[in-house]
Structure formats: C-alpha cells, structure tokens
Image: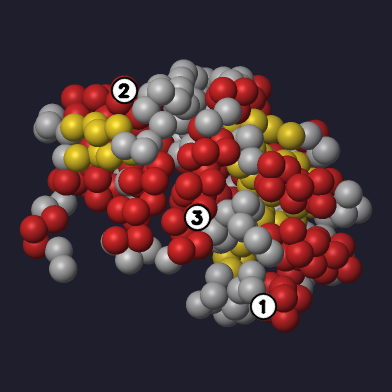
Amino acid sequence: MMKTENILVIGGTGKTGRRVAENLIQEGHNVRVVGRNTSPAFDWENPGTYDAALKDMDRAYIVYYPDLAVPGSREAITTLTEKALQAGLEKVVLLSGKGETEAEACEDIVANSGLNYTLVRASWFNQNFSEGAFLEFVLNGQVALPMPEAEIPFVDADDIADVVAKVLVDDRFNGETITVTGPRKMTFGEVVAAMAEGIGKDIHFHPITIEEFKAGMKQAGLPDSYVWLFGYLFQEVLGNPDNQEISHDVEKVLGRPATDFNTYVEKTVATGIWNQDLSHTV
C-alpha cells in the first residue's frame, strides 16, 4: 500500500494539471492545486507566493506558464526549486517540452537542485484541438497552420497525466527523463482528416507560412508574447526532424500503449465539445 502524500499541483487548472490532480485525488492523496486565484495563491511572476504554496507539501508537479521557452522561466524555476528544497519537499516532477532548448535549460536546473525529480518531456498535445489554441479552427471547419510537412507524434493529455501521477509517487523513476508521445507520427493534414471523419463534418486544412500564422494571431488580438511563443514552437520544435521521434515511454511507465489520435477523436466527439455553434458566441 503506497503511503498518502501531500502533493502540490502547480498549474492545476491547465490541460495536464487538472487531470493529474484528479488522478492523485482518486488514489487518496492530499492534493493542493494552486494558481493565481487559489488560496494560497501562486503566481509565477511573484516569487513571494511560492513559500505558502510549498508549505507542508511532500511532492510537487510543476507546470510553468505559459511555457518553459519564455524569458524568465529559468529564474522562476531556480527560485521555486530552492524554496522547495528549503521547505523539505521529497520530489518534484517537471513538465517539459520535447525538443525545446530553453526547456532543457530548466530541466538542468531541476536536475541539479538537490531534490529528487523526474522530468516528463511531452510532444504536442492532442487536446490543442479541443481545449486549446486550435479549437476555434476546428469549430469553424478551417484549420490554417504552418509546417504542413512536419510529422508530429501527438500525445494525449490523459496519457501525460497518467504518467505524471505514477512517476510523482513512484521513486523508481527518480532521476529519469520520460518522453511522452503518441504511437504514430501525423501531419496537420492527416490530423484534420481524422477529426473531419470522426466528427462527421467538413474540416479543411490550409497550409500557411509562419509569418501568416503570426499575423493572424496578432489580428485576433493575442498578446505579442503569445505570438512569439507559437512562432518559436513551430520553428524550434516542429522544424527539427530529430524532435519528432516516437517514444515508447508511456508503455514503459503505464504498461499499456499510448492513446492513438483516432481514439482521442472518439473520446472528444462523445463530450460534444466539437458541436458548439460559433454563431451564438460573442
């Protein structure tokens, strides 16, 4: 019987944090989910909020918002890990990005922090199309994205959460880097075709340049930092074929295969999220 832990989930309302918290609660652990609007509050930009969040915690799942690639992430991760060590935490798990140079610098900080740790490097999420940046494209039936030739082993957020919940409390994975991907590589065109078939509606893929994509984001009123980040992720991560290797770590950790994109489509269709009518939204 595994002992009950007090576990901090930073970014607990995000795609993976919400799922990780649910998994840990189901397993009987005491979970503290923190963000800007929680009590205690946690704000990456205000290190004064870190101590209260870490108090009395045994372990922590760290998701840096918006991404480890952005300026300021190294300083924040350094401060958080120093405070976590002082607070007596036993272990942290950092969510990192597959093939991101900046993220790897943050991984090194965690690895050299003096804490037990596991690093979880994730490929691009399936849920970007249902809970994230590309949902509106799917609802509109027009998906315009750059890098049409990139082959991406899209990973399911449920798989990431299952892996994180396991390695957080299982010290056999201490010091390891776990790379989570889906079981096959797909281009954006193939992904859009799979969603169109699964949803039963016409969805068209339009390849565009990165410059056109960034211009569209600016036009939509997104902040410059967000526009920069997506440009970076497309160029840095998808532009490097070495970053698109398929990993079998999901199977290694969980003893089951990674979720296929078609299975994700079936699960998501059942939620009704893709049936929204945009004409009624403001």
Left or right: 201 in relation to 78? left
Residue 226, x across and y down, in percent: 46, 59
Question: In which quarter of the view is residue 130 placed?
Answer: top left
Look at 36% across and 38% down and name the residue there: 209
Position of the N terminus, as image quadrant, is: top right
Residue 229, x across and y down, in percent: 51, 53
Kindly identify the amino acid type of the residue bearing the numbered disc 1. Asn
The dot on residue 190 is 2
Q: Earlier in the sequence, mark 1 or mark 2?
A: 1
The dot on residue 228 is 3
Q: Which residue is mark 1?
A: 46
Question: Where 11 sits versus 127, above or below?
Answer: below
Kindly identify the amino acid type of the residue bearing the numbered disc 3. Trp
The kind of secondary structure element at disc 3 is helix
- Residue nearest the viewer, comparing 119 with 28: 119
Question: Where 256 sits versus 134, above or below?
Answer: above
Residue 242, x across and y down, in percent: 62, 23
C-alpha span from label 1 to label 2:
42 Å
- Residue nearest the viewer, comparing 175 with 137: 137
Q: Earlier in the sequence, mark 3 or mark 2?
A: 2
Q: Residues within 10 Å of mark 2 (few under 14, many from 20)?
A: some
